[in-house]
Image (spheres, coloured by chain):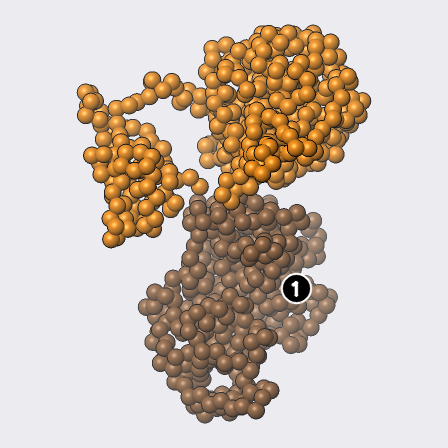
Chain colours: A brown, B orange
Amino acid sequence: MSKKYVDEYEKAYTPRLVMEEASRCLLCLDAPCSSACPAGTDPAKFIRSLRFKNVKGAAETVRINNALGAICARVCPTERYCQAGCSRSGIDKPIDIGGIQRYITDYEDALKMDTLEVKEANGKKVAVVGSGPAGLTSAAELAKLGYKVTIYEASNKAGGYLRFGIPEYRLPTEIVEKEIDRIVRLGVDIVLNTRVGEDITMDQLRKENDAVILAIGASKGKMLPMFLNNKKAVLAVDWLKKVKSKKGNIKVKENVLVIGGGDVAMDVVTSLKLLGCPHVTDVVYEQFSEFKASKKELMGAQEQGVTIIDGYVPVAARGGQVKFKHRVINAELKIKADLVILAVGQYVDANGVDVEIDRNEVKAEGVQVANTNVFFAGDIAHGEKTVVWAVRSAKEVAYRVNKFLGGK
Amino acid sequence: MVKKDLSITFMGVKFPNPFCLSSSPVGNCYEMCAKAYREGWGGVVFKTIGPKHYVINEVSPRFDALTKESEPFIGFKNMEQIAEHPLEENLADLRRLKKEFPNNVLIASIMGSNEEDWEFLAKAVTEAGADMIELNFSCPQMTSHAMGSDVGSNPELCRKYCAAVRRSTHLPFMAKMTPNITDMCEPAIASIEGGADGISAINTIKSIINVDLDKKVGLPIVNGKSSISGYSGKAVKPVALRFIQQMRSHPKLKDAEISGIGGIETWEDAAEFILLGCKNLQVTTAIMQYGYRIVEDMKNGLEHYMEEQGVDHLEDLVGLANKNLIPAEELDRDYIVYPNINLDKCVGCGRCVISCFDGAHQAMEWDEEKRRPNCNHDKCVGCLLCGLVCPVGAISLGERVLKPTNKKPRNVNKIVLQDSMEKL
């Protein structure tokens, strides 16, 4: 087993250091960090609570606003959201909001705080399809309001991409399980090994529940036609799932080629390095100036010594040998690897859930399928495809479902 | 989500929570006090109202701050006096506040220069609808020596003016004490004897906090000169707590109701004042620096503390620490606690060695090769200065031993120690 892969890559703050970091916060008027958080986690308020020695109050703020607070603390690309607006950048560099949030949620966990409360049962039932970030959050939000929520999950374990996609060094399975446990304690039932459309029909869900929320996510990896039936090529999502399920207990090849430049690709290349792969080459369609991956993940990969080549498109493949051409200049590249991992995007598999999908999003206005009791959240809703946006989308959908069912 | 009742009765008046603005720039008009109430303060002490004949004319600038390393405000100096608005306007503000916020407590602070002034002002604020009154015997920057801290350091004047106010109002009132005195108990007792229902302490400490080295004048500079004036903020908390403890342990004052003031910024500060016997708390400097919003974490943090302590009424925490502060001659001097150095935490800076040699008893030895300290018990007196200076909290309270002079056998494990030397 690789200790590097299973240990959290980012070091946790000690009480002294988190206070030093919180002391850098300027405690702004109308704080830009809080306005910029898609999930409404309110960093300005929880940092101020910490600063004034009220760590428990800080934990309450995080948890009340974000049922996946401990997860977001670790995986959110904060440089694009809360930290982008941080006024401290006018002096030196933004406050490490993710790190502070992690300290606060670790504290919450250490003290076994149970912040969330459930209102009296209102007798109404909601089914949620999918147990990724959007499914979990919408379930938590509605359970808090008194709904009886049941999540249907096709896999044998809950958590979706949180459990099977994001590598252990960035998001330990233990953290995901604790967040799920918190939501289960609100009275949410999770039914595993149940694929909607096969084990239970949409019609049945719609009839047996007052509302149904689809939170199925874009869970399938895209295949490039030139790699079809290529035994040396695997899809990134499948590879990440295998590695995480085995806690990094796999044998990696000597020389691995990764194709793709998003956060998933960065997760793959960094995992490979942490697992001891000596030669990791990442070839990316985008040029550095237009890179999709978060800067933090890109820097993490570079720190690990991954070779990153930007601006090339694969044009032909035979076994582990792949030929690329530069998108702009006249240049060619040939790489022969023991394994090729494709991280070129994901798509939504909407089989069995009876909704029309167009470019990976449900074809509908707003968050509800017209004239039905079906709502949708997360990847398949309009918006960015990050965990924090899934939380935002789920909070919005929970609000809409509650209104639809006559709640206040 | 924690939910505890923070209400507490002080001088016969029920406060929704013990947190009040103190009489100062932070409660200078209707708009300020209304915003403070809305943000969660239990009460306000409206900025001190003076007699009509006393004309306020302030200097500019009028504040300065004492800093240390990266801390912006350790202490704060203020030269502002009492309310500058006309008496009628202040009374109109009091009336409007009481009408619009009937469930919050409104305290009028007043200051006169003779008995007639005190009588007149006490009647005026009573008629305006205040719930209680605070007599400002303690502002150290008044331009009249018949007012402010010159009164508070004279017990006979305190007694006389309290009696004048007692004759003029049915409301409960407290006398606000100056720390610019050796023994606060004397004016406090005189005030209670004169008719006061309680004491508030402390007002600001007379100070000069910085001197401009080029112009050779204290700060803030007012056309090339400066004056001694009141010092407040976190730095004065220890002084405030000491005076409060002394009053609480005086037989004539042990049951006096006290409103605590001096450097309160966090719920922890608040809890300290409560444990030392305060049923009410007043804040200014932290509000000037951070705004009224700080009350959110003071309230929520205090609720969590009540939860941890298993207490449902704030009242149950009042004064719990008073009995544990005893005269120095009564302390247990039979044992030594040696430092326990956690070498896994140690980063090898050697600060403990420097402080032990230069400021203590030369007991901390230094391994130059490994850059690690070692405590020599033959020299160590157990002062634990090392634990206070350690930047990583690697030094804790370790082995306890009885001094050889100790005759009776004792169980050292029953000695009650603090949990840690680390300051966070």
Between B40 and B168, the one nearer to me in the picture? B168
- Residue A220 left/right relative to A400: left
**Image location of residue B127, percent across then percent down:** 77, 17
Question: Residue A37: which quarter of the image?
Answer: bottom right
User: Horizontal and vertical percent for residue A258?
Assistant: 46, 80
Q: Quadrant of residue A383?
A: bottom right
Residue shown at the point (45%, 63%) measured from the top left:
A170
> How many numbered discs, if any?
1
Q: Position of residue A51 (x, y in %)?
A: 53, 44
- Which residue was labeled with disc 1? A375
Q: Is residue B163 visible?
A: yes
| Residue shown at the point (34%, 70%) measured from the top left | A249
Provide residue B307's location: percent of width, then percent of height: 49, 35
Q: Identify the residue at horizontal 42%, vertical 73% (top origin).
A: A305
Determine whether, in the image, residue A46 is placed left or right of residue A8.
Answer: right
Chain letter of disc 1 in the image: A
Which image quadrant for residue A280?
bottom left
The vertical placement of A110 against B248, above or below, is below
State whether residue B21 appears in this view.
no
- Amino acid type shown at disc 1: Phe
Between B418 and A131, which is closer to the camera in this rendering? Answer: B418
Please report the residue visible at 57 percent of the width from the left and 24 percent of the height from the top: B206
Helix or strand or loop: what does disc 1 sit on? strand
